[in-house]
Amino acid sequence: MKRALLTTICLAACAMPAAAERLADWQVYQQGAALELSIDRNALWQTPDGLAHFVNQERFTQRQYDKHYQINYWIRRTTGYADCKKYQYVLVSTDFYTDTNRHVWSTMYPVPRYAWKWQPVYQDTLAGAMIDLVCSNPASRKKPE
């Protein structure tokens, strides 16, 4: 009996998110009829070498299909890093969710740093709006807690 209770408690604890993990605080930087783009302000932090870590969310009003991964989704969250001094960014992993925020699929491992492909950012583009938000946010200057 005790063993079954202990197993149940351990399984429940493993299924729960980490207590230190904070809820997302989505700041919208572009909103349209079919798509909303936002940055999680609670996921912004700075690496020791000065890059800004961020999570970008694309929330669609219609179900989407990713041919490469062969999955349907409504929300795509991409983790990336911004080099604010060089005005460029790199995306390293992707997570997919349903319209009710249920997890569908994630890339298994982030792209290793040696394989990063930096993307230049141009003014007056969506990438420019994203990077401006990431680089101007005071939270991006703090290390994770």
Image (cartoon, helix red, strand yellow):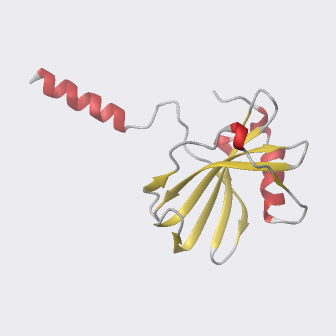
Residue visible at 63% across and 57% down in the picture: 57
- Residue at the top extreme of this rendering: 2
User: On screen, 79 above or below 61?
Assistant: above
Q: Residue furthest left?
A: 1
Answer with left or right where residue 51 lies relative to residue 62: right
Residue 85 image offset from top left, x and y in percent: 91, 42
Q: Percent position (x, y) of residue 136?
A: 84, 45
- Between 117 and 130, which is closer to the camera in this rendering? 117
How many numbered markers are drawn?
0
Q: Residue at x 28, y 28 (%)?
A: 10
Quarter holding the N terminus is top left
Q: Position of residue 56 (x, y in %)?
A: 66, 53
Q: Is residue 140 left or right of residue 26?
A: right
Q: Residue at x 43, y 56 (%)?
A: 102
Quadrant where the C terminus sits is: top right
- Residue 15 picture location, percent across and down: 35, 38
Vertical placement of 140 versus 123: above or below? Answer: above
Residue at point 56%, 74% (across, down)? 61
Q: Which residue occupies the foreground of this view, 135 or 86?
A: 86
Position above or below: 28 against 67: above
**Left-right relation of 129 to 80:** right
**Viewer-proximal residue, 113 or 43?**
113
